[in-house]
Image (cartoon, rainbow, N blue to C red):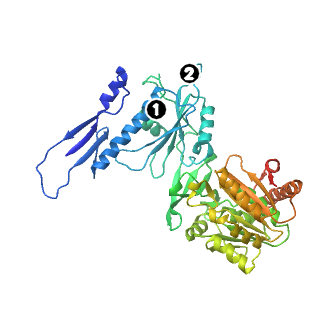
């Protein structure tokens, strides 16, 4: 038998005496047994308290030891000084013997202010809120750090498929681990303040688990937001930091008097959907029956909103994934009727065939995510921006129609290439970049609105119409579109 044991006492003595950096100390215990045929060697690790874990191979032993050494080196670096200006450091925390993380911790510093006395704190992100900009992005966490006013902040997120008894229990569980992330000069007996939003760890309930041949494993979950507002979300497990679709839920009394969860059809979770809706309003004049094609269904939130907002618009939605139609119908209240049809088909092939048949649309919307976003563009996939397909889109919308593209691109080179392809096909292009998102909504047409003032006045009128319709249909009580911001930030491509 071969066992590797961590010697916590030796590590604790080392930093206290100033001897070394307090890196992990291991004891190796070897026990010799009589050799028996077909009996595999017994390999064990004991790296957390008295918990002994049996592993299958020597490679697993080495991996466990290296992982602990690496995390200890990170903690040692944090003990030596500030990491302000060096970005963030993040670690995953596991229960002994488990292979999925229980917590993820992002540690970040700002320049040390001696007079503040606010050296270090931990911030616990409630369940379901880890995808919000403030907690999910480096820029957001930097804003949180400045707002909290501490020199160092450890931002802790909680994972799915874990049970958390409450905020106090989480604090107690995390205290020792958080102390290892403290800045230099902080006494080991210092009580670290734990911050959060509200007084609990939030609520998360998984409603459905599914698998798609296209998108992989996914879940539908319900989480509690501000003011105990309930939201239902579609999450792809291969990209858990991104909400694929979200619906706000309303509690209504059923005939039997029991509360019933109902999807709020006036809620647009994705800000870019608001501005795509403005494009539809521009392409679909009031009182005229219009045809709109939406490539990319997801949970159906955009299609459902368009269906309720524009009573003369007929929507053709296209998605390659049959699992998405099932989820949208079952959990996000997507209802097909005489004004909404959904086709399970490859979006590229749909556009090509529509162009061949001479099918026309007043507007074509691309809201398609890429399954391989590593090239710097996560929406749409590159095959949706090739010149031949854009020519087919132009055939579908004609001289007066509108092509509305949701572009999510972190590469300036790829964006320039996309705009170049669009300019080669369409006479007139304008765009609106969302302030706190990577999304950029691009409006393309062959209609004679090349002048800057014409674009601005046309989109302003369309935005005001969306606001008026949303109120009239009781989808939204306030101003859905910030018209002033839209017009001031609108870019016209020459």
How many other residues sit within 10 Å of disc 2, few (<14), some (14-19) or many (≥20)?
few
Q: Does residue 77 lie above or below 352 as drawn?
A: above
User: In the displayed structure, does residue 93 sit left or right of residue 419?
Assistant: left
Q: Can you give x and y, in whole percent of width and height, for residue 120 in the image?
A: 52, 28
Q: Nearer the viewer, residue 13 or 421?
A: 421
Q: Does residue 227 lie above or below 26 as drawn?
A: below
Q: Which residue is mark 2?
A: 117
Residue shown at the point (37%, 24%) measured from the top left: 15
Q: Residue furthest top?
A: 115
Q: Nearer the viewer, residue 149 or 432?
A: 432
Quarter of the picture containing the C terminus is bottom right
Q: CA distance from mark 2 to mark 1?
A: 17 Å
Q: Is residue 76 visible?
A: yes
For residue 181, the mark is 1
SS of the residue under disc 2: loop
Q: Is residue 474 visible?
A: no
| Label 2–label 1 contact, CB within 8 A | no
SS of the residue under disc 1: loop
User: In the displayed structure, does residue 185 sit left or right of residue 395?
Assistant: left
Q: Does residue 101 lie above or below 471 as drawn?
A: above
Front of the two marks 2 and 1 = 1
Q: Residue furthest left?
A: 34
For residue 353, the mark is none
Q: Nearer the viewer, residue 311 or 183?
A: 183
The mark tally for this picture is 2
Looking at marks 2 and 1 on the same chain, the residue that comes earlier in the sequence is marked by 2
């Amino acid at each position: 038998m071969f066992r590797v044991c961590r010697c916590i006492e030796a590590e604790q003595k080392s930093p206290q005496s100033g001897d070394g950096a307090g890196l992990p100390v291991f004891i190796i215990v070897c026990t010799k047994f009589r050799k028996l045929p077909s009996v595999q060697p017994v390999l064990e690790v004991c790296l957390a308290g008295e918990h002994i874990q049996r592993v299958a191979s020597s490679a697993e032993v080495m991996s466990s030891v290296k992982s602990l050494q690496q995390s200890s080196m990170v903690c040692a670096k944090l003990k030596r000084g500030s990491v302000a200006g060096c970005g963030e450091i993040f670690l995953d925390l596991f229960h002994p013997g488990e292979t999925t993380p229980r917590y993820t911790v992002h540690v970040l510093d700002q320049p040390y202010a001696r007079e503040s006395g606010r050296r270090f704190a931990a911030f616990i992100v409630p369940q379901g809120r880890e995808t919000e900009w403030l907690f999910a992005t480096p820029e957001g966490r930097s804003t949180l750090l400045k707002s909290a006013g501490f020199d160092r902040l450890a931002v802790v997120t909680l994972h799915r498929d874990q049970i958390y008894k409450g905020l106090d229990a989480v604090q107690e569980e995390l205290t020792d681990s958080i102390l290892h992330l403290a800045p230099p000069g902080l006494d080991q007996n210092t009580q670290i303040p734990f911050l959060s939003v509200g007084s609990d760890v939030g609520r998360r309930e998984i409603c459905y688990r599914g698998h798609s041949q296209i998108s992989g494993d996914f879940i539908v979950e319900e989480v509690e937001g501000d003011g105990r507002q309930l939201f239902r979300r579609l999450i792809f497990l291969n990209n858990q930091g991104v909400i694929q679709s979200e619906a706000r839920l309303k509690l209504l009394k059923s005939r039997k008097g029991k509360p019933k969860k109902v999807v709020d059809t006036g809620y647009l979770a994705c800000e870019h959907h608001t501005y795509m809706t403005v494009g539809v309003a521009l392409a679909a004049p009031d009182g005229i029956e219009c045809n709109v094609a939406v490539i990319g269904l997801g949970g159906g939130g955009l299609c459902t909103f368009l269906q309720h907002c524009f009573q003369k618009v007929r929507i053709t939605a296209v998605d390659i994934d049959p699992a998405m139609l099932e989820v949208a119908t079952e959990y996000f209240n997507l209802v097909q009727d005489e004004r909404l049809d959904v086709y399970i088909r490859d979006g590229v092939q749909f556009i090509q065939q529509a162009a061949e048949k001479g099918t026309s649309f007043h507007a074509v919307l691309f809201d398609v995510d890429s399954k391989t976003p590593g090239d710097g563009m996560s929406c749409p996939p590159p095959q949706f921006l090739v010149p031949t397909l854009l020519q087919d889109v132009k055939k579908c919308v004609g001289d007066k129609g509108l092509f509305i593209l949701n572009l999510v691109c972190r590469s300036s080179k790829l964006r320039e290439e996309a705009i170049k392809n669009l300019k080669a096909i369409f006479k007139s292009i304008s765009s609106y970049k969302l302030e706190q998102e990577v999304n950029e909504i691009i409006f393309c047409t062959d209609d004679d609105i090349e002048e800057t003032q014409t674009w601005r006045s046309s989109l302003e009128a369309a935005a005001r119409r969306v606001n008026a319709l949303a109120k009239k249909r009781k989808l939204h009580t306030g101003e859905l579109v910030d018209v002033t911001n839209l017009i001031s930030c609108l870019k016209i491509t020459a």
